[in-house]
Amino acid sequence: MFGRERIEYKTPEQVLLMRRAGLVVAEALAAVRERAAAGVTTGELDAVAAEVIGDRHATPSFLGYHGYPASLCVSVNDEVVHGIPGPRVLEPGDVVSVDCGAIVEGWHGDSAITLVLDGAAPEDVALAETTERAMWAGIAALAGAERLGAVGEAVEDVVDAAAVEGLNGGQRYGLVEEYVGHGIGTAMHQPPDVPNFRSRDRGPRVRAGLCVAVEPMVVRGQRFTQVLDDDWTVVTGDGSRASHWEHTVAVLDDGIWVLTAPDGGAEKLAALGVSIAPLA
């Protein structure tokens, strides 16, 4: 009665369906990246993603989820996650985290990127780059992990190293703990949780069929957050800027495959000494 929640392990055929959903998400985020610029509203970015998802005969994962009103989450500057797109006009130097999900034949894909608009401070560029590196380090750790906790350990190592490297003025970035990665499959959020930090709980064993979203959220100030009156938008408690990166990853018999990366994660993982497994 005190065991872990049941994990939904996927068959190779189900992973292929999730790959289709992941590629829809990748296309939608690529279109958003191309459109994002100063003078564009967050609502316009949402419309771009919704059009791509619809054209691919997929369904947005987010729209209607517990009443959420949009296809994307677009979080700007001190907004960490779950920012609702609307009339807000992007400005030069904004840090814009975009989270997208799509469903194909009942299976989900989920991914997020951080866009740093022209005119941004070097410290904000470094924040986004560090968060992306932390995500890829976590994904690479998953490839050889015995327990899922290895992901959070790898993420935290990158965040800690950034301070030693002199990034963020030599101060440690805040690593958000209230929100974590998650299992994904027939539901967008399902067991197991995937923390972005070290924990005494090493997590479940990693085995073939496990599909998870790895998604570090890193801030330039303190890690603490609060939710705005809209009951969705999560902001930093001290007003510091935030970055969010995410990919959906499948564990296969011979390794891993990043389902929301067009190349399966081959290029980024090769740089970390990891080869992706064949996807049947």
Image: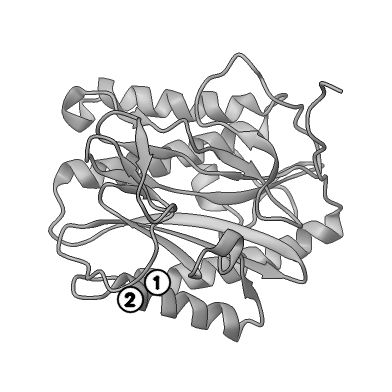
Q: Would you say 6 lies left or right of 264 here? A: right
User: Which residue is at 49% across, 69% downward?
Assistant: 69
Q: Looking at the image, can residue 260 be seen?
A: no
Looking at the rendered structure, the kind of residue marked 2 is Arg
For residue 1, above or below residue 31: above
Q: Nearer the viewer, residue 29 or 195?
A: 195
Percent coordinates x, y for residue 158 in the rendering: 40, 28
Q: Residue at x 53, y 20 (%)?
A: 198
**Is residue 182 found left or right of 243 in the rendered image?**
right
Figure colour scheme: one colour
> Under tag 2, what secondary structure?
helix
Residue 45 in the image: state x and y as whole percent.
37, 74
User: Relative to 134, is 48 above or below?
Assistant: below
Furthest-top residue in this view:
200
Q: Is residue 179 above or below residue 259?
A: above
CB atoms at circles 1 and 2 under 8 Å apart?
yes
Q: Pinpoint residue 47: horizontal percent, then vertical percent.
A: 43, 80
Furthest residue in direction bottom, as rendered: 55
Rendering coords of residue 1 (x, y %): 87, 23
Residue found at x 39% / y 63%: 84
Residue 32, which numbered label?
Answer: 1
Q: Name the residue nearer the viewer: 4 or 233.
A: 233
Q: Is residue 19 above or below residue 209?
A: below
Q: CA distance from mark 1 to mark 2?
A: 5 Å
Mark 1, other Cα within 10 Å: few <14 / some 14–19 / many ≥20: many
Residue with the most extreme front position: 229
| Residue 67 vs residue 85, the one in the foreground | 67
SS label for mark 1:
helix
Label 2 crowd bin: few (<14), some (14–19), many (20+), radius 10 Å: few
Q: Which mark is residue 35?
A: 2
Q: Is residue 262 left or right of residue 131?
A: right
Whether residue 245 is visible to the viewer of this picture, yes or no, is yes
